[in-house]
Image: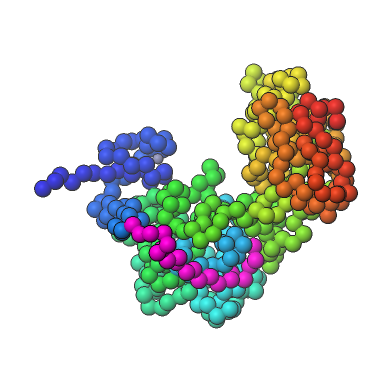
Amino acid sequence: MAKKSSLFECQSCGYQMSKWAGRCPNCGSWDEMLELNETQKQVLKETSSAKQIKTQAKPITDVEVESITRVTSGNSELDLVLGGGIVEGSLTLIGGSPGVGKSTLLLSIAGNTAKSGKKVLYVSGEESLGQIKLRADRLESLHVNLYLLCEIKLSAIKSELLANSYDILIIDSIQTLYSDELSSAPGSVSQVREITFELMRYAKESKTAIFIIGHITKEGSIAGPRILEHMVDTVLYFEGDSSRELRLLRGFKNRFGSTSEVGIFEMTDKGLISANDISSKFFTRGRAQAGSAITVVMEGSRPLILEVQALVSESGYHNPKRSATGYELNRLTMILALLERKLEIPLNTYDVFINIAGGIKIQETAADLAVVAAIISSFRNRAISKDTIFMGEVTLSGDIRAVFNLDQRLKEAQTQHLSKAIVPKKPSIKTNIKCYEVDEVSKIIDWM
Ligand SMILES: [Zn+2]
């Protein structure tokens, strides 16, 4: 008989090894290595082999396209991100930092779908029935088809699901649930994997659409994040600053649609509503201040006007600080090196901080030029007028490259009554915005 091999797993990051260690070699946390028992190893085997069912190759012309049944969530932004609505039998993970609006969104979706005749179960391990009802009342989500269950034990949830069937199941949150077949703590890698696996199996068998809420830690990851992301059909993340009203819901994975669309919401006392007049809310008009520059980025198919803020201040240390919130730090470092070289600004003795207003993460390079402008503006302590937008990608050689969808971005700027644009190339459309061509970083100084 073959000797049983042991398998140890880090409960904070999921790293596996055959020997025990006091400190995880992958994430460095102490006392997190746990030996997996036979059941856990079985689940592990099943989850990895689930996708490898033996089949025969067949001609592409004979392949039948799976038909997907969708229902509307009653929220146009969520439908957009999901690719046209909630897919029957799908498992969706909604992640985000605490307080960003995950429970609020899902409770209102629960209410919407219940009203449209679906039977919905909302499982909460976080709040009491009374608290949820109060919140549902505020969100106008009360309906007889919406069922609540306060439970953290997977076995109890499973027996409820055996007794009654539901069209939609919401789990709030994955970190609070636990399976008593495992000895590890709720939220640990083994627990998260086991529970997600069970939920996935249930979704596929029963055709129930399941939403799982996952809290993100300060470091920006869900407990056992990779594992969870690999297992579920769709992964959506909430972005935004809980002290502000705007939220973005971004798709990271979608087995039933593209991840290019972004949902944009406004948090009100009635919950998250689709933001209609989006742009005007991400930047403040007011008085022009040094260190602020405006740009237009594309979020999915929609242009969004954002404010880039920079603070450049003399550094008291040998190693000047560089920090970027909502913008890639590597790009900032590159831009700073470029400015130093091309414009002979001694930025190596200055601390530089970049922030994108509204807690939004810029995902494209079109904002580079606005970052350059904001840095120079702060360095020289000279304000840029608030009716000017900057769009362009900065290259290593200091050239400024064109951005895609320039016409659409300018149109958006025009509807927001902005009047000047600094762009690498003049647009093809006629616009009321006065466009200035700047094709090299050094020319921006002349312009300013
Ligand atoms: Zn680890």
Q: Which residue is at a point 74% across and 62% down the rendered structure image? A: 276
- Nearer the observer, 267 or 64: 64
The residue nearer to you, when weighing 139 against 420, is 420
Lateral position of residue 304 relative to residue 251, left or right: right
The magenta stretch is 57-77
Image quadrant containing the C terminus: top right
Q: Is residue 380 above or below residue 236?
A: above
Q: Is there any visible trace of residue 374 in the rendered image? A: no
Main SS class of the magenta portion in the image: loop
Position of 11 with respect to 432 (left or right) is: left
Q: In which quadrant of the rendered view does residue 110 lie?
A: bottom right
Task: Tell me the quarter of the picture where residue 151 sits.
Answer: bottom left
Q: Is residue 6 magenta?
A: no
Q: Position of residue 19 (x, y in %)?
A: 27, 37
Foreground of the two, 406 or 18: 406
Q: Residue at x 78, y 25 (%)?
A: 442
Marker count (numbered): 0
Q: Is residue 75 magenta?
A: yes
Residue at 85% from the left image edge and 35% from the top image edge = 383
Q: What's the coloring here? A: rainbow
Residue depicted at 76% across the width and 43% down the height: 295
Residue 262, horizontal then vertical, whole percent: 63, 55
Q: Position of residue 304 (x, y in %)?
A: 73, 51
